[in-house]
Each structure stands twice: as C-alpha cells, then as structure tokens.
Amino acid sequence: MTQLTTSQIWQQIKNNTQSLPHMRELFAQNPQRFEQMSLSECGLMLDYSKNRVDADTLSLLFKLAEQANLSDKISAMFNGNKINNTEQRAVLHTALRAPATTSINLDGNNIVDEVQQTLSKMAEFVEQVQSGAWLGYTGKSITDIVSIGIGGSFLGPKIVTQALRPYWSKQLNCHFVANVDATSICEKLKGLNAETTLFVMSSKSFGTQETLTNTLSAKDWFINQGGSQQDIAKHFVAVTSNVAKATEFGMDANNIFPMWDWVGGRYSLWSAIGLPIALLIGMDNFKALLAGAYDMDKHFASAPLAQNMPVIMGMLSVLYGNFHNAQSHVILTYDHYLRGLPAYFQQLDMESNGKSVTLNGTDVDYSTGPVIWGGEGTNGQHAYHQLLHQGTALIPADFIMPIQSHNPLGEHHNQLASNCFGQTQALMQGRTYEEALSELANTSLPDEQKQLIAKHKVMEGNKPSNTLLMDKLTPTTLGALIALYEHRTFVQGAIWDINSFDQWGVELGKVLGNDVLERIGAASDANELDASSNALINLFRSGKI
Ligand SMILES: O=P(O)(O)OC[C@H]1O[C@](O)(CO)[C@@H](O)[C@@H]1O
C-alpha cells in the first residue's frame, strides 16, 4: 500500500463520500451553495456547486493537497526545478508567457531573454507574412499556411487557431497536416498554389517520423509544382529545439524558430510552436493569449488552495477518480469555435497522467488519469448524453460556454445557453420514479404500462458537473482557460505523486513502429516476431488479404 492510500485523510474522504446525501438535498439544505462554491478568476467563472461535495469534503480534499505538499510542488515547477525526473528536465512552459521583465534562471541563463528574442523573431516574420511583404518564389504574397506537426506540435496550434477564427487575418488561410497517412497531406494540398503556400514544420525533436515524412512529401510537391531547390527558403520554415538536425535536414538557418527541452510537447503552443496561431491572428493577439495564460499562472502560484481554480478542479477530479471509481471525464464545449478543445485536453491530460508508478518508481494502488473525451454542445445531447444521464458509469462533466457569442443571431445563443444550463440541472437533479409517474398521469395508458415506462424514465441524478463561463471567447480568455486545464492536470499528478511530464509509453510505440517498418521493407518475410505480428506484416507485404 502507498502512503497516499494508507493516510488518515484518504480514509476520511472515503467516509465522507459514503455519508453525503444526494445533491438535490445538498442544494435544498444550503441556499448559499452557489455563492460558496463558485469563483471568478482571470476572466473565467467556475461554478462547482453541482458536485458531490459539502464543506467537509472540500476541506478534506484541501488537506489531502497539503499532505501531498502541493504548494511546494507548484513552486518547484515555477522555479525551474527539474521535476521531470526521468528526463532530468525543468518544466517551464510558464516562462513562455512570463512578462519580459521577469527573470527565470535555468542552469545559469535567464531563459526569459531567449523567450523574448524568439517572440521578436516571430513578430518580425508574422508582420512580413501578414502584410504581404514575404514573397513566394514568383513574387506573390502568401495566402495559405500549411502546418506540419503531430501531437503537441499539432493539437495546440490547430485547436487555438480554430477557436480564434474571428481574429484571423483576412488574407490568410490555414491547414494542418499531422497523420502520416498520405491521404491527409494529399487532400490538404489539393487546390493549393505552391507560389503562395508557406509550410511551417513543427517538431520539438525534429525526429518524429510522421512530421519528417510529411515535410519531405511537401517539398516534393513544391518542386513538382514548379518551385526549385533555391526557392525552398521562401516557402519552408521550421520550429524545433533541435536546430542542428533541422539545418542538416536542409532548413534555412534564418527560417528556424527555436524552442527548448524545458517545454513539453503538449505544453508548447505558447512557444514558437504557436507560430501558425500567430500568423493567423497576429502577434498582438498571440501576446494576448500569452497574457491570459500568465494571469492564470499568477493565480495558480499565489491563491490559497481553497480559492485556487486549478486546485479546486484538480481535487474534484481526484475525488471522482479515486473515491467514486469514475473512469472518464467529459468536456462539453457549448461554443462551436471550441469544438476541438476536448481533443486538446485529451492529449494534455492523458499523455501527462496516464502513469502507473510514482516518481520513485513504486507501483500506484489508486487510479491515475481518467479517459478524457467530449465534444460540442448541443450535438452531444443527441448522441452520448443519454449515457451520462442514465448509464451505469459515473462520468463527471465540464460544461464550457461564453456568455456572448461572436455570431449573435436571433434566439440561437439563448437556446444554446438554455441547453447548457438545462443539462447540468438534469444531471444534478435527475428524475424520481414518482415524478416520472406523475408526468404520465394524464395519459390514457393502462397503469401497468405507466409504471413500466416510469421505471425507464427514472434518472438517478447526482451526476457531477462544473460549469465554466466567460464573457466572450477572446485570445485572453482562451489563454486563461487552457492554462487552467494545464494546471488542473498538474494538480492531479502532484497528488498521485507521478511524473506528468514524460511519455515513455508513446516512445515504445515509436521504436516498435520503426522496427516493423524495416521488416515491411525487408527482402524476406517476417518470422521473428509473434505469430500475429509476423502474419500481419507478411499479408501487408503481399499486397492483399
Ligand atoms: O514535436 P515532436 O518532437 O515532433 O513530437 C510530437 C509529439 O510526439 C509526442 O512525443 C508523442 O506523441 C508528443 O508528446 C509530442 O507532442
């Protein structure tokens, strides 16, 4: 047994959760519940009153956080301690959004200076492309950006540009290629003009198979369309922490934007990995995104645990995963621009907290990261919400919605909001058998049928949700929102005493993938692997089933 699960507080939380009444009752008992269980910070309002907690639960959860030395761990991250202990790396994505006047020393260097230099290089480049001064090989301005990258070098730029569509420069369009499946790049390149297309190749390691292969194919396409080898510098730029490898690959040294090993891939959109975002929304808006995140950083680093938004959300997630056996967590964005956010949070959380040993290598005896999934409201209501309401699994939900729409049109936004709030209410209160029966009272059905249907209409309720509102989706509020989830992920990892910043499971897949690739191209059939793998490779080599 680990120290965590044998601790007295762990047991106390267990007891508390078993003795709590239904949320309906908690609301009935305490008319101040919303006031007491909501807070506004950094342009975001969090209502966490529809959770299976009372004041005692919360105080126990904060005690658990204290027991796990959460505050010290937060400081260690912000101070640049090498908390990624398996890779001996600092975790300093927060330095990417720190003001220019800040000083953060890492191995004797003030890294804020390097960050600011890169931001200036980005600003110069963005200005040239947006103004039309950056010319392609036939003297035409750029119209299309194709971003090539995968994982953290894809999801952040993609989801943020999608979310900030109202802020796009009118002259530019953006496309993302991640998958090594040729269909992805072929479909994206159809209809593009090589003379006016700029490729941004993003790879922290500059060693990711998908990204290298897609970049080579993009180069071939560019040459086939009429560009020459010398023209490549006008159409290809790279973002990487491996500048030497990028130069070796043929990237023009002036076109390489640096990042650093102290920025994890899934935390990197704030670095030059965010270049596609900056190209689309402009540097001022990109800086507003950083400012929103910085605001959340300040809040996270300084607010007491009980008034700390990421801490509250992280501890609630610990509560459900470890004390209510919740295996997944759903993110429901009631805003079309935020439709990609669940996928982004999925990588952020699952790649960070999908771990089974503690920092010192002890096996955990509690659940770590849940499955993160979700989608856009109201679409999900007509698909998977049924399972949220009446399925057997407990699935805590986050509802996210801006109060003002970028596209105010008739009754649309009122209806959207009513669905969002109505869902949280239905999840919380449910419907009792008596209520279901009385709803059927005026029908002509025989009593037996009424009773049967009423049974099927019962919704247990007591299903937890958070609601996050913002005035409007802007670069600043989006920055704060994403940083909130980054820190929420950190909080959970800190309680579970795991390393949220490595990803060895993913690395094994990459190594085995390369081995299989060699066998696919080998002179003779595969026979050294397990029977299934050999057979699959050999069928593929034969070109048919
Ligand atoms: O930016 P790179 O080095 O190409 O890596 C891409 C992605 O691969 C991963 O290592 C694993 O998929 C992610 O963490 C990372 O964001």
Image: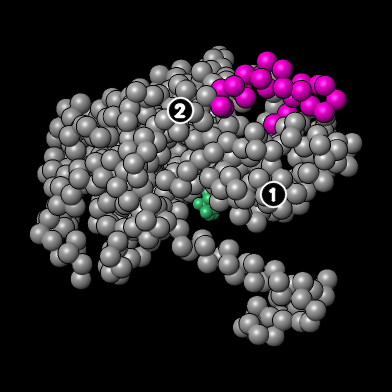
The quarter of the rendered structure image containing the N terminus is: bottom left
> In this figure, which residue is indicated by the disc labeled 1?
249
Identify the image quadrant of residue 41: top left
Q: Residue at x 13, y 61 (%)?
A: 7
The reply to whether callout 1 and callout 2 are in contact (CB within 8 Å) is: no
Depth check: give the residue in front, 64 or 136: 136
Tell me which amino acid carries mark 1: Phe
Q: Give the structural element (helix, strand or loop) at label 2.
A: helix
| Range of residues picked out in magenta | 121-145
Residue 92 visible in this rendered orientation of the protein: yes
Label 1, label 2: how far apart the Cα atoms are: 26 Å
- Dot 1 or dot 2: first in sequence order is 2
Q: Residue at x 82, y 28 (%)?
A: 137
Depth check: give the residue in front, 458 or 147: 147
In the image, residue 341 lies at what x, y percent?
50, 38
Q: Residues within 10 Å of mark 1 (few under 14, many from 20)?
A: few
Identify the image quadrant of residue 194: top right
In the image, residue 379 lies at what x, y percent?
55, 37
In the image, residue 364 lies at what x, y percent?
29, 66
Depth check: give the residue in front, 273 or 40: 273
Residue 445 visible in this rendered orientation of the protein: no
Depth check: give the residue in front, 20 or 525: 525
In the image, residue 457 lies at what x, y percent?
40, 47
Tell me which amino acid carries mark 2: Gln
Q: Residue at x 85, y 25 (%)?
A: 138
Check if residue 382 falls in the magenta segment: no
In the picture, the disc for residue 116 is 2
Check if residue 143 falls in the magenta segment: yes
Q: Is residue 387 left or right of residue 310?
A: right
Figure check: 26 above or below 130 = below
